[in-house]
Amino acid sequence: MANLILCDPVGEVATSHKRSVPIRWSPNKRIATLFNNHVSSYRFWKRLEELLKERLGGSVVAMLAKENTFAPAPREIIAEIAETADLAIVGVGA
């Protein structure tokens, strides 16, 4: 017979707050985005890409998208990002 162990579900909220280090950006660096094209976040992602283009300039932003929403990104796309971008923003599930 197996023992059943009950745990108290009450947790404690962490009180420390860590600040992220700001990203230093220069005009000659390139950024890439990779999105899975899922309908639930399509509008958000497209707006993010628009803002990046507006603030950084369209020539430094490469927008990539997977064709299959639920499959991992093909190696070719990952290789392209690695070769051409200094920073990549990858959506969840991409």
Image (cartoon, rainbow, N blue to C red):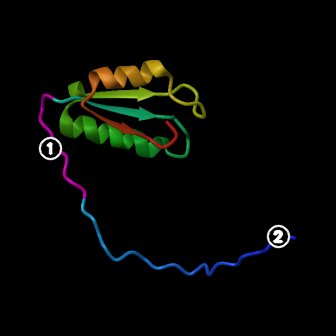
Identify the secondary structure beneath mark 1.
loop
Instruction: Provide residue 2's location: percent of width, then percent of height.
Output: 82, 70
- Which amino acid lies under the numbered mark 1 shown in the image of this protein? Arg
Q: Quadrant of the N terminus?
A: bottom right
Residue drawn 31% across and 38% down? 50
Please name whichever residue, 16 or 61, is drawn nearer the observer in this view of the structure: 16
Please name whichever residue, 54 or 32, is drawn nearer the observer in this view of the structure: 32
**Relative to 13, residue 88 above or below:** above
Label 1, label 2: how far apart the Cα atoms are: 55 Å
Q: Which residue, given by chain and number where applicable, does mark 2 sit on?
A: 2
Instruction: Give yes or no for residue 26 being in the magenta stretch.
Output: yes
Q: Could you tell me if the residues under marks 1 and 2 are in contact, i.e. CB atoms within 8 Å?
A: no
- Which amino acid lies under the numbered mark 2 shown in the image of this protein? Ala
Sooner in the amino-acid sequence: mark 1 or mark 2 = 2
Instruction: Give yes or no for residue 25 being in the magenta stretch.
Output: yes
Instruction: Provide residue 67's location: percent of width, then percent of height.
Output: 54, 25
Q: Which residue, given by chain and number where applicable, does mark 1 sit on?
A: 24
Residue drawn 20% across and 40% down? 55
Identify the secondary structure beneath mark 2.
loop
Magenta stretch in the rendered image = 20-28
Instruction: Provide residue 88's location: percent of width, then percent of height.
Output: 32, 35
Residue drawn 23% across and 38% down? 54
Crowding near the residue tagged with mark 1, few <14, some 14–19, many ≥20 C-alpha atoms within 10 Å? few
